[in-house]
Amino acid sequence: MKGSDLLALAGKHRIAVGAAVIAAAGAIYALLHLADLMKWIEERPGLAAWVQAVFSVVAIFVAIWTAQSATREARRKADEERLDDFEAIAGLAGHAVNLIESAYQRSAQSRSLRAIGSVDRHSLASIRDAQRALAEIPVLSIPGGATTVSNVLAIRRLLAEAEATLEPDHFGRPEMPSRLYRLFERAQKHAEWIGEAAATARKRS
């Protein structure tokens, strides 16, 4: 670094230090003479009333601003939670579709009655868990409006149909794989709509 640069840097440093010292001195002076200032104001009733009025107005504006800030933050958190719930529901719907597809694939690949029975017990337990999870979601709390609610309810009905298809009475029936496949196709359409709606809601937030 050149000598001229060092001198310029030192000059800037001295200016910054000087400004800080002046600001600190001003603050100390104000604190030391605050009592005198308050006494001077109190000795003038008209001025004191004006000062009180100004501070009252300022206090009101501060209270309003604080309340509005808290309201905005609470609304932001509520919106974020609703988006998280929306995405969780979309994920659960996609999981339900995967379970029905898996049940179809297992049943289509099984050749013996014993193998089909084993597949059914495995798939049936998973589908019941997914159906229970969707059923525990309060309908009124589902985000996205009436269309989302109708799609969620449709997936719940399709899971119930898949569960009925996988009951022991259907072991070995040749129509079981094709019926599961039709349920999978219908559930997939509903789940895709929910997923797209959740993604759109996230982008708009």
Image (cartoon, rainbow, N blue to C red):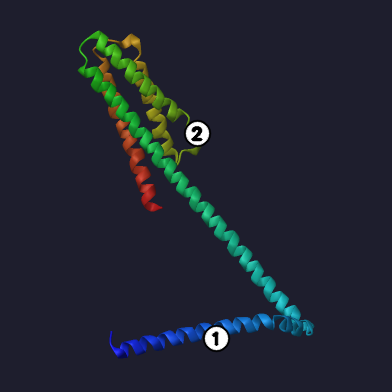
* 205, above or below 10, in the image: above
Type of amino acid under label 2: Pro
Mark 1–mark 2 CB contact (< 8 Å): no
Residue placed at 33% from the left, 18% from the top?
A: 122
Residue 195's quadrant in the figure?
top left
Task: State the residue position of label 1.
Answer: 22
Q: Earlier in the sequence, mark 1 or mark 2?
A: 1
Question: Can residue 144 be seen here?
Answer: no
Q: Where residue 68 appears, x then y in whole percent? A: 57, 60
Crowdedness near tag 1: few (<14), some (14–19) or many (≥20) residues, C-alpha within 10 Å: few
Residue 66's quadrant in the figure?
bottom right
* 167, above or below 130, in the image: above
Residue 48's quadrant in the figure?
bottom right
Q: How many marks?
A: 2
Task: State the residue position of label 2.
Answer: 138
Judge left or right: residue 26 versus residue 126. Answer: right
Q: Where residue 121 appears, x then y in whole percent? A: 34, 15
Question: Can residue 27 be seen here?
Answer: yes
Q: Nearer the viewer, mark 1 or mark 2?
A: 1
Crowdedness near tag 2: few (<14), some (14–19) or many (≥20) residues, C-alpha within 10 Å: few
SS class of the residue under badge 2? Answer: loop
Q: In the depicted view, which residue is nearer to us: 84 or 41? A: 41
Which quarter of the rendering shows the N terminus?
bottom left
Q: In the depicted view, which residue is nearer to us: 195 or 193? A: 195
Q: CA distance from mark 1 to mark 2?
A: 64 Å
Q: Where residue 138 appears, x then y in whole percent? A: 50, 33
Judge left or right: residue 1 versus residue 144. Answer: left
Residue placed at 51% from the left, 82% from the top?
A: 20
Residue placed at 40% from the left, 89% from the top?
A: 11
SS class of the residue under badge 1? Answer: helix
